[in-house]
């Protein structure tokens, strides 16, 4: 559909372009990952799990107040399509919340409350789902769980996997990140943690999670007339992470071990809501739930970084929502159009129908056929409330 060259259309694209310019400065994960995780881990273990880590964070390289002002000075009222006007208002409020998160990183309760505003916190039902998963046994003796591959060997596996997709991206290394690998959307880059030795299963998980969804939605997001698909709709994290774990499931790489990892994250974030310190959350995971201390440390770090980062519980809630959406026979490809959210499916269709967006070019490889053969995984996903 050809777009009409009206004043309102021109205003929409100018606002969209301006938001895109502003949000390139606010990749939250670039700021919230501590720079001294490994050094603080050694100190924490030496203290017998009693002295909370003192994490150091990257410097913020933008003027926070000026950025807020620029977001709220845009003339949204010039967009005469009420639906689009409301969408862009919600986008501006969403990004303003992320700026508040970034500007309070390391500031204890302030950051936690801003994180709560942007990402929410687990409900009682979410915690019950996590505890349900933790009742299942995991087989850690299987060969595909054994650490074998260095970061550079893992890069080769990623590059080989990526040949099935018609796009290219950068790969970089980091020794200061909490995750073992992650996609940085704004620079189309996959970052690999050099401190980690990867197992066969982890590589299968990461290929389908990071490249099969996060990189796919990054690349699809760049193809639209409007740039909001690239920098992200409000509440997109739950849907994007849910899609990414669903890709692990469809490719046959989702295991009870992995589901338990996501459940532990819910427990860790719930402990924030209960006011637990870093060391108390760690001891909860390590002592009460018998989680090995290295994994307990990293899951606790993910939840407590910045002062209390609640995002991690959304992997499990997102997986359940995407799984149910797929089981209902709905069009899952629509969720690959960019950094979008299930809450905005009707808006995505509206934007495509009116020429503001296009259907996804790159489709997650695993979505073409369900390769999961583990009946326990299906039972768990069907049983989650």
Image (tube, grey):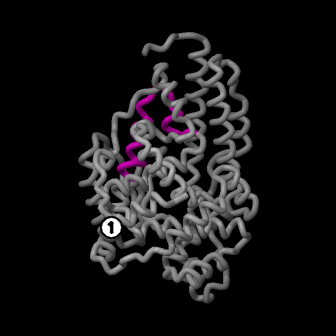
Q: At 62% from the left edge and 79% from the top edge, which residue is drawn? A: 284
Q: Nearer the viewer, residue 348 or 39?
A: 348
Q: Main secondary structure of the magenta part?
A: helix
In this picture, is 66 found above or below 256? above
CA neighbours of label 1 inside 10 A, class few (<14), some (14 to 19), many (20+): many
Magenta segment includes 226: yes
Q: At 69% from the left edge and 27% from the top edge, which residue is drawn? A: 74
Give left or right: position of 303 versus 345. right
Give left or right: position of 86 versus 265. right
Q: Nearer the viewer, residue 40 or 328?
A: 328
User: Can residue 296 be seen?
Assistant: yes
Range of residues picked out in magenta: 210-233
Give left or right: position of 244 versus 70. left
Q: At 49% from the left edge and 82% from the top edge, which residue is drawn? A: 292
In this picture, is 276 found above or below 42? above
Question: Residue 194: horizontal and vertical position, in percent?
Answer: 40, 68
Q: Nearer the viewer, residue 385 or 243?
A: 385
Residue 46 position by quadrant: bottom right
Question: Residue 325: horizontal and vertical position, in percent?
Answer: 46, 44
- Label 1, secondary structure: give it: helix
Question: Residue 279: horizontal and vertical position, in percent?
Answer: 65, 79
Quadrant in which the C terminus appears: bottom right
User: Can residue 218 be seen?
Assistant: no
Q: In the rendered image, which residue does mark 1 sit on? A: 201
Residue 191 position by quadrant: bottom left
Question: Residue 360: horizontal and vertical position, in percent?
Answer: 38, 34
Magenta segment includes 141: no
Q: At 57% from the left edge and 60% from the top edge, which residue is drawn? A: 313
Quadrant in which the N terminus appears: top left
């Amino acid at each position: 559909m050809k777009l009409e060259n009206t004043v309102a259309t021109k205003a929409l694209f100018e606002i969209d372009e301006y938001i895109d310019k502003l949000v390139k400065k606010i990749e939250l994960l670039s700021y919230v990952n501590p720079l001294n995780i490994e050094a603080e881990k050694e100190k924490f273990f030496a203290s017998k799990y009693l002295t909370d880590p003192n994490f150091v964070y990257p410097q913020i390289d933008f003027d926070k107040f000026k950025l807020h002002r620029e977001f709220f000075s845009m003339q949204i009222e010039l967009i005469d399509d009420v639906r689009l006007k409301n969408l862009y208002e919600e986008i501006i409020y969403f990004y303003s919340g992320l700026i508040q998160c970034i500007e309070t990183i390391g500031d204890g309760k302030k950051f936690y409350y801003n994180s709560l505003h942007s990402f929410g916190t687990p409900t009682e039902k979410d915690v019950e789902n996590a505890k349900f998963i933790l009742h299942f046994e995991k087989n850690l003796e299987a060969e595909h769980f054994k650490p074998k591959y260095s970061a550079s060997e893992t890069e080769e596996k990623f590059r080989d996997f990526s040949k099935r997709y018609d796009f290219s991206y950068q790969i970089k290394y980091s020794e200061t990140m909490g995750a073992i690998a992650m996609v940085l959307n704004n620079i189309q880059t996959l970052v690999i943690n050099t401190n980690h030795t990867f197992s066969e299963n982890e590589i299968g998980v990461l290929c389908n999670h990071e490249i099969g969804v996060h990189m796919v939605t990054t690349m699809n997001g760049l193809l639209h007339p409007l740039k909001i698909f690239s920098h992200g709709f409000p509440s997109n994290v739950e849907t994007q992470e849910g899609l990414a774990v669903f890709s692990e499931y469809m490719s046959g790489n989702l295991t009870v071990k992995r589901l338990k990892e996501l459940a532990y994250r819910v427990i860790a974030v719930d402990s924030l809501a209960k006011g637990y310190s870093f060391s108390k959350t760690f001891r909860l995971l390590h002592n009460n739930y018998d989680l090995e201390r290295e994994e307990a440390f990293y899951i606790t770090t993910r939840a407590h970084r910045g002062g209390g980062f609640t995002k991690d519980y959304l992997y499990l809630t997102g997986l359940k929502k995407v799984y149910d959406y797929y089981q209902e026979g709905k069009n899952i490809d629509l969720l690959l159009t960019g950094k979008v959210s299930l809450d905005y499916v009707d808006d995505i269709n509206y934007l495509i129908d009116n020429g503001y967006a296009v259907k996804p070019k790159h489709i997650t490889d695993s979505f073409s056929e369900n390769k999961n053969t583990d009946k326990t995984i299906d039972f768990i996903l069907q049983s989650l409330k």
